[in-house]
Amino acid sequence: MSGAGQAVKHVDFSKMETKKTSEDEQRSGCCNPVKTSGPVSMDHVLLALRETKEERELRIRSLFNFFDAANVGYLDYAQIEAGLSALQIPAEYKYGKDLLKVCDANRDGRVDYQEFRRYMDDKELELYRIFQAIDVEHNGCILPEELWDALVRAGIEIDDEELARFVEHVDKDNNGIITFEEWRDFLLLYPHEATIENIYHYLERVCLVDIGEQAAIPEGISKHVHASKYLIAGGVAGATSRTATAPLDRLKVVLQVQTKCTRLMPAIKDIWREGGFLGFFRGNGLNVLKVAPESAIRFYTYEMLKNLIVNAKGEDKGDIGTSGRLVAGGIAGAVAQTAIYPMDLVKTRLQTYACEGGKVPKLRALTKDIWIQEGPRAFYRGVVPSLLGIIPYAGIDLAAYETLKDMSRTYVLHDNEPGPLVQLGCGTISGALGATCVYPLQVIRTRLVFSFQCIFTIC
């Protein structure tokens, strides 16, 4: 038993129930159906739990007193953390700060009983609404097939083993069905919105169903039917970021191909004189165009390699470990880079053409001239140093990211989980470190791409 359900297990809410589901009801698959129509209310919750208002009040007061071990009449962050730790809920899914934030209505850093009770009211109503939405047969319990249907409708696909693991973690009495009491117990201390997507991701953290922390390619995405959502989102984000940094990319390439000692400002002035403001964005169209295929190839290759590694290990689990992520990510990056490399080469050629009068070569004409004058192999000139830099970059980036995150957790956050800003900072530093280490290979690659341009010029 894991997660919020442990709170109920330790406080023993079951003793506060007036009735229990009979063995005949369990065998027939019926729990405690609520036939009352209309909007969900607290009366529905009480009927589903077979509680009176007084019994429910006693149950909530007992849970509050469990956290308020010092009997001070309120809960602060330290008490919530201590209570969650006493329940042996691992730090990665305690959500102590989020729980305090959502309970603390007046934002004074403390949660009194009325605020705690208000959270319980809202949470139980929220959990009952989604419970009813999943319970399509309205027999008062969730069957495994109903849960599977709800996950599929939400765009999430899991296999039979993972579905059984989901039910096992929620189903306290191991009868193969989930009652509302069990549903409530599992999610009661989960402070985020109870959507089926959030509940699934919460379960991923609770029972370690293939959830990784690899920044480049997230684990667990292969379980989603609509993986295209991730590719589209990644493509839009990649196109936006590359457009925003296009002037820096153009400037970097121009400086890389120089054989004489150059300075930053003269290079900027040359770009401006040659093409004005738009000169800084030369080649960005190709840069944006290659984002989607590169992401798609890298993503699907990574997932395929991940499955191969799991099968090779002979272990029935999705976490392939740090070394596995490094190998799979490096190879997937190499495959994607090889596939889109001709686009990258044409982009670099476009960025480094010194055209008189600001006349930019047509993309089609440039590609045709490379093919005719240099041959098809020219489209892969410089690919070797480019590929040689991928695996060390991935290794340095991943190792530095994990090290920085562990250091921030230990020395800055004092054993609390790093938030999005801290993870962003760790990712920025680790990415910069990896890029710096393999930068000489990038310079070699750019010089190789540029070398034949000096012979075959169309401007």
Image (spheres, helix red, strand yellow):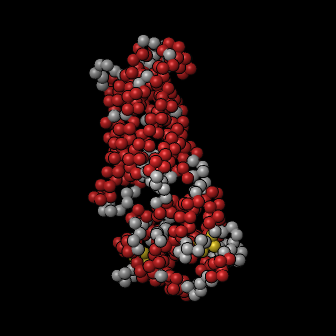
Taking the image as shown, residue 421 lies to the left or right of residue 16, namely left
Query: Residue shown at 34%/53% (left/top)?
Result: 405
Query: Residue shown at 37%/22% (left/top)?
Result: 447
Rendering coords of residue 43 (x, y %): 63, 80
Q: Is residue 285 visible?
A: yes
The image quarter containing residue 289 is top right
The image quarter containing residue 392 is top left
Q: How many marks?
A: 0
Rendering coords of residue 436 (x, y %): 32, 36
Rendering coords of residue 133 (x, y %): 65, 66
Q: Nearer the viewer, residue 207 or 379?
A: 207
Q: Nearer the viewer, residue 102 or 213?
A: 213
Q: Nearer the viewer, residue 349 or 316?
A: 316
Answer above or below: position of 177 versus 199. below
Rendering coords of residue 194 (x, y %): 55, 65
Answer above or below: position of 56 versus 222. below
Query: Residue shown at 57%/52% (left/top)?
Result: 224
Query: Residue shown at 60%/49% (left/top)?
Result: 226
Taking the image as shown, residue 62 lies to the left or right of residue 435, namely right
Q: Nearer the viewer, residue 151 or 102?
A: 151
Taking the image as shown, residue 431 lies to the left or right of residue 237, namely left
Answer above or below: position of 434 versus 50. above
Answer above or below: position of 253 versus 182. above
Q: Is residue 80 visible?
A: no
